[in-house]
């Protein structure tokens, strides 16, 4: 498989909307990008993110999730065939097993809509508002076998206003996510 000018061959895994995928595609098209997105994988046939992959002519594949083992075996084969050096999870809703992470043996990143270690898992904005937190934010971290617990690469805060709803907070956090993910990739790949 062709490697373009030292850029890391990257696979993005999605399950839905794909706005982070869209921002990663945008970054990958910049001259200085350190990654080339060669593959988008979704576990959901109806994921809107697949449209962004198609628009940019990026090879995209839906792997139906019948069982974890079956899904991960097929995914690993695909990653090997495409010489993937880096996986970016972007709204991917399945948890990858320790076995898979070990077998892949290269970096896997995830973006999470909270200031980890606060609020691992789902409904982060709801929990931050319920707890009357002053700040929320987003985190990019390395994926390990414990959910949302790997090494933190980069975080950014946003203020939670009294007037914020779950929706408005989600919107604010998503906006910073789109800038944070490319920055975190640069940090990871340049040790900066
Ligand atoms: C983002 O909030 C991300 O942090 C979380 O899932 C959401 C995905 O959104 N892991 P999108 O599909 O990238 O628009």
Image (cartoon, grey):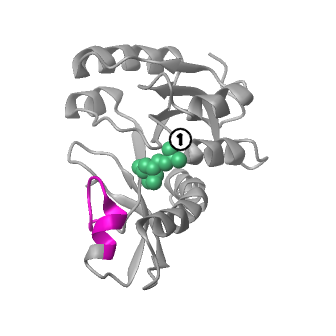
Which residue is nearer to you in this view: 146 or 56?
56
The residue at 50%/58% (across/down) is 191
The residue at 20%/47% (across/down) is 146
Q: Is residue 64 above or below residue 98?
A: above
The residue at 47%/69% (across/down) is 169
Provide residue 129's location: percent of width, then percent of height: 33, 75
Provide residue 157's location: percent of width, then percent of height: 46, 75
Q: Secondary structure at mark 1?
A: loop
Answer with left or right where residue 85 lies relative to residue 36: left
Answer with left or right where residue 77 lies relative to residue 144: right
Q: Please identify the quarter of the rendering in which residue 50 is found.
A: top right
Which residue is nearer to you in this view: 191 or 82?
82
Which residue of the protein is positioned furthest toward the right in this rendering?
Answer: 31
Q: Please identify the quarter of the rendering in which residue 100 is found.
A: top left
User: What is the quadrant of the N terminus in the image?
Assistant: top right
Asked if residue 120 lies in the magenta stretch, the reply is yes
Q: Is residue 173 above or below residue 107?
A: below
Q: Is residue 2 above or below residue 163?
A: above
Establish whether ligand 1 lies closer than 8 Å to the Cβ of label 1: yes
Which residue is nearer to you in this view: 126 or 53?
126
Q: Please identify the quarter of the rendering in which residue 112 is found.
A: bottom left
Answer with left or right where residue 172 lies relative to residue 34: left
Graded by Cα atoms within 10 Å as few (under 14), some (14 to 19) or many (20 or more), the crowding at tag 1 reads: some
Asked if residue 11 lies in the magenta stretch, the reply is no
| Magenta-colored span | 117-129
Which residue is nearer to you in this view: 122 or 32?
122
Provide residue 35's location: percent of width, then percent of height: 63, 40
Q: How many marks?
A: 1
Identify the residue under disc 1: 17
Provide residue 118's location: percent of width, then percent of height: 27, 68
């Amino acid at each position: 498989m062709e490697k373009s000018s030292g850029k890391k061959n990257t696979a993005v895994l999605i399950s839905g909307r794909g706005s982070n995928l869209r921002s990663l595609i945008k970054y990958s098209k910049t001259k200085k990008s350190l990654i080339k997105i060669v593959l988008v994988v979704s576990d959901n046939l109806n994921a809107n993110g697949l449209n962004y992959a198609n628009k940019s002519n990026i090879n995209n594949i839906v792997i139906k999730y019948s069982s974890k083992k079956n899904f991960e075996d097929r995914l690993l084969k695909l990653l090997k065939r495409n010489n993937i050096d880096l996986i970016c999870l972007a709204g991917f809703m399945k948890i990858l097993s320790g076995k898979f992470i070990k077998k892949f043996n290269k970096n896997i990143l995830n973006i999470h809509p909270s200031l980890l270690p606060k609020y691992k898992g789902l409904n982060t904005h709801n929990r931050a508002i319920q707890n009357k937190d002053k700040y929320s934010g987003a985190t990019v971290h390395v994926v390990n076998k414990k959910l949302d617990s790997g090494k933190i690469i980069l975080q950014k805060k946003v203020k939670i206003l009294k007037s914020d709803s779950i929706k408005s907070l989600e919107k604010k956090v998503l906006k910073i996510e789109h800038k944070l993910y490319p920055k975190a990739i640069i940090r990871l790949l340049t040790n900066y």
